[in-house]
Image (spheres, helix red, strand yellow):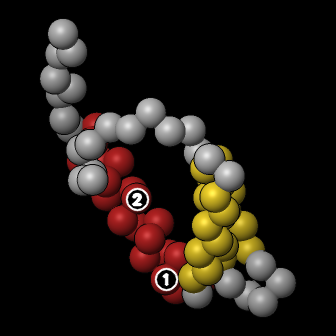
Amino acid sequence: MGINDERDIEANLQIGPTDQGMVRLFVLADGIEIPMDFSPDEAREIAEEIRAAADGAAKVKPKSRR
C-alpha cells in the first residue's frame, strides 16, 4: 500500500497531550487502536511535514475520475 493507494476504511484520529508530556496521535479503525506518542519537538516536525504536504497538495490538479 502506498501513499496514493485509496482504501475504503473509516478511521478516527485524535491528537492531544498526554499526562507524561508527550503528544499522542491516537488512531481507531476497524476496532484497532494505534496510540503513537511523540516528544513535543517530534510533534512540531510532524506538523511541519503536514503543512508542507498540504501546500503541495493544494498545487496539484486532481485527475478526473471516470
Can see residue 25? no
* In-front residue for pair 31/55: 31
* Residue at screen point 68% across, 52% down: 31
Q: Position of residue 9 (x, y in %)?
A: 50, 39
According to the image, label 1 marks what residue? 42
Identify which amino acid the numbered label 2 is placed on.
Answer: Ile
The label shown at residue 50 is 2
Residue 41 vertical position relative to residue 58 in the rendered view, above or below: below
Q: Is residue 58 left or right of residue 9?
A: left
User: How many numbered circles are shown?
Assistant: 2
Q: Position of residue 30 (x, y in %)?
A: 62, 47
Quadrant where the C terminus is found in the figure: top left
- Of mark 2 and mark 1, the one earlier in the sequence is 1
Q: Is residue 60 left or right of residue 53?
A: left
* Residue at screen point 18% across, 16% down: 64
Q: Is residue 27 left or right of residue 19?
A: left
Tell me the distance, in whole angstroms, between the alpha carbons under discs 2 and 1.
Answer: 12 Å
The label shown at residue 5 is none
